[in-house]
Image: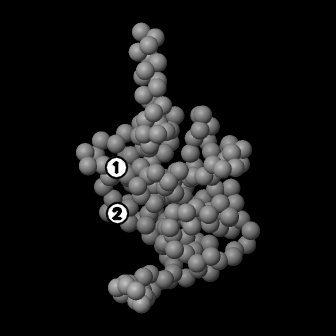
Amino acid sequence: MTSAASSPSLEPFVLADHPVLDMLNTLAAMDGAPVEFWRSDEDVQAWLDRTGWAVPKVRFAKGELLQAALTLREAVRGLVERRKAGGQGSPDVLNRFLATPSYQQLDWPASGEPRLENVWATATAEQYLAPLAEAAAKLLVEGDFNLVRECEHPDCVLWFYDRTKSHRRRWCSMALCGNRHKVAEFRKRKQQ
């Protein structure tokens, strides 16, 4: 597997318009080769911070968070692919992440309105990732899978949730794959 380490400034794409699909996109393809953006616990934590998952930082044994995140991501990827294809998948791995004790807590900041927040146990890395697992389960149950799509570029493996008004989004990003498609089409026309 290609490492994203060869490009130190390269970060996982956050363009899917859904946090669970952004998680799937932490494994991407560039120039036809797979690129794994999660190579360490720190990479996973940086992604959680960047994408706004409000989870308190907890220390786990080295590699534990990475392994749990990769396990969750690949389980969810399989379930999303099966759901998109109209099939049935086994939720066993996802359910293991969901089996985390949680409770609701009232938060009422001095400068705002009261709100209920979920609080999850975080003794294990699986419990730590429970909010993300919950979002994945919610996507699988409530998401409109007519709008959950893979990029149409043949070399791209990125997913997105089409929130455009016309629901005709074809590319993970116009700046990435949309532009590559336009350039390829232009070259074809020039050669003819």
Q: Provide residue 121's location: percent of width, then percent of height.
A: 55, 82
Left or right of residue 78, residue 71 in this image: right
Circle number at residue 141: 2
Helix, strand or loop under label 2: helix
Left or right of residue 37, residue 166 in this image: left
Earlier in the chain: of badge 2 and badge 1, it is 2
Residue 122: in sight, yes or no? yes
Q: Is residue 29 above or below residue 143?
A: above
Q: Quadrant of residue 59?
A: bottom right
Q: Provide residue 140's location: percent of width, then percent of height.
A: 38, 60
Which residue appears at 53% of the width and 50% of the height? 13
Left or right of residue 127, residue 183 in this image: left
Mark 1 neighbour class, 10 Å CA radius: few under 14, some 14 to 19, many 20 or more: many
Tell me the amino acid under the disc marked 1: Asp
Left or right of residue 101, residue 2 in this image: right
Circle number at residue 119: none
Mark 2 neighbour class, 10 Å CA radius: few under 14, some 14 to 19, many 20 or more: few
> Label 1 near label 2: C-beta < 8 Å?
no
Tell me the amino acid under the disc marked 2: Val
Which residue appears at 46% of the width and 11% of the height? 191
Q: Provide residue 68's location: percent of width, then percent of height.
A: 61, 65
Q: Quadrant of the C terminus?
A: top left
Q: Quadrant of the N terminus?
A: top right
Residue bearing mark 1? 162
Helix, strand or loop under label 1: loop
Which residue appears at 62% of the width and 37% of the height? 33
Q: Nearer the viewer, mark 2 or mark 1?
A: 1
Residue nearer the viewer, 150 or 182: 182
The alpha-carbon separation of the residues under discs 2 and 1 comes to 17 Å
